[in-house]
Image: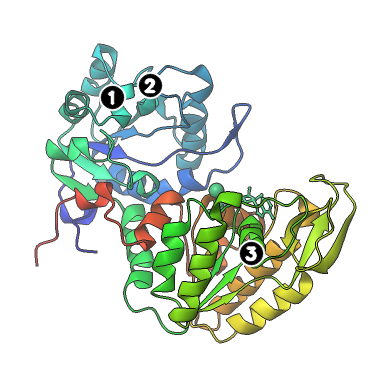
Amino acid sequence: MNKQTVRDIDVRGKRVFLRADLNVPLDDGRITDDTRIRASLPTITYLLERGAIVILASHLGRPKGKVNDALRLKPVADRLGQLLGRQVRMTGDALGPGVQVAVDKLRPGDLLLLENLRFHAEEETNDPKFARALADMADIYVNDAFGSAHRAHASTEGITHFLPSVAGFLLESEVRALSTLLGKPPRPFHTIIGGAKISGKLEVLEALLSRCQAILVGGGMANTFLAAKGNAMGKSLVEADQLENASRIMAEARRKRVRLMLPTDVVVAAQIHYRSQRQVVAASGVPKDWSVVDIGPATVAAYTTHLAKARTIFWNGPMGIFEIAPFADGTNAMARYVASRTAAGVVTIVGGGDSVSAVDKLGLVDQMTHVSTGGGASLEFIEAKVLPGVAALLDREA
Ligand code: ADP
Ligand code: MG
């Protein structure tokens, strides 16, 4: 990575504003997946061990510029405290006189977590005064929030105009791993793509068409491709306004000689429900009142056979409605297969919120080359877009 990191600066006794992505999923105030907190630990401990004064900040959910008690960072502070084995103190706001008093009391090796940045509308509008006020608390800015790096917000971009700004370890490792996909990944480079919709993933599909040798499609997205080829999809999720885009992508794949594979068989269900009746049918024979909820076993077999040739595999988007266990077989089978290829020397990279949670549920995170915490940021990175939160950091001297 051509950006400076925490390794390049002296942090001892300095006040460091550390922007992390602690945006974890909550269910009734309980953290259901603490991956992002754990992924932020290396930078936090590194800074604390070197005697920095760490002012930690993040957003949580979408409070839209207003205080929302359900989106306070208290559960995050508690979980972080458990993981660090020390109490994590919090402020009642991200900014203001009370915060300044708390910051002034901090000593080297201390950690203070600011309240949810997005309680202030100025965070997302990247208001320069707000960014300046955040910067005024600190001497150095460290960005470790890869998951927010595709947004030019006050705490990811604005603040860099006022402080020397470097990357944390998580951001560095994300950029490094995902960069292999943009450079010259070992060939053949195959992508598995799924999830609910084509819309929102058009750009990533386009980008992958120029880099991959094969694209294996699953999930709700496959329904739209199948519909564009004239198949009746029953009650399945199909994006009627994306049929033309789907046809165009298939034509582009043919022109570029990229193998674009669609399911040949699918699991259909009478209802989107745990106890629903279900059956495996040909992709061309979806019954009128049924919905496609997963890829079928013949498709799993064909996809894994094709993937056996790949030297690089990128995966984004589940193959079915994996949140409902009986509809998760296709997603789980693909996850297990991809994980098994890592030991064979294949570069295996997973990106996207739901695909990552599927891999995590199976306990396979450690068996992949890289699992991105980035979600949308990882997709924009693969589209070769400039991520404002990365671009704004200090360049490494040549
Ligand atoms: P990611 O977060 O990995 O990028 P997406 O957000 O694009 O993935 O898509 C995930 C969602 O797609 C999941 O909630 C899943 O239930 C849904 N999904 C997958 N297959 C289908 C399908 N056949 N019909 C409807 N929804 C689907
Ligand atoms: Mg998602």
The amino acid type, in three-letter code, at marker 3 is Gly
Q: How many marks?
A: 3
Query: What element does badge 2 sit on?
Result: loop
Residue 76's x, y, as percent? 49, 33
The reply to whether residue 142 is in sight is: yes
Label of residue 65 in the image? 2
- In primary-sequence order, the first of circles 1 and 2 is 2
Residue 61's x, y, as percent? 48, 32
The amino acid type, in three-letter code, at marker 2 is Gly
Task: Tell which of 291 and 382 is nearer to you.
Answer: 291
- In primary-sequence order, the first of circles 1 and 3 is 1
Q: Are marks 1 and 2 in contact (CB under 8 Å)?
A: yes
Query: What element does badge 1 sit on?
Result: helix
The image's colouring method is rainbow
Q: What quarter of the picture does the N terminus occupy? A: bottom left
Q: Residue at x 53, y 60 (%)?
A: 244
Spot the residue most to the bottom.
309
- Taking 345 as reference, is 50 left or right? left
Label of residue 80 in the image? none
Label of residue 218 in the image? 3
Q: Residue at x 51, y 51 (%)?
A: 199
The span from disc 1 to disc 3 (Cα, nearest Å) is 39 Å
- Taking 199 as reference, is 15 left or right? left
Q: Label 2 neighbourhood size at 10 Å, few (<14), some (14-19), many (20+)?
A: some
Q: Nearer the viewer, mark 3 or mark 2?
A: 3
Ligand 1 has an atom within 8 Å of the beta carbon of the residue at disc 3 = yes
Q: Mark 1 sits on what residue?
A: 122
The reply to whether residue 349 is in sight is: no
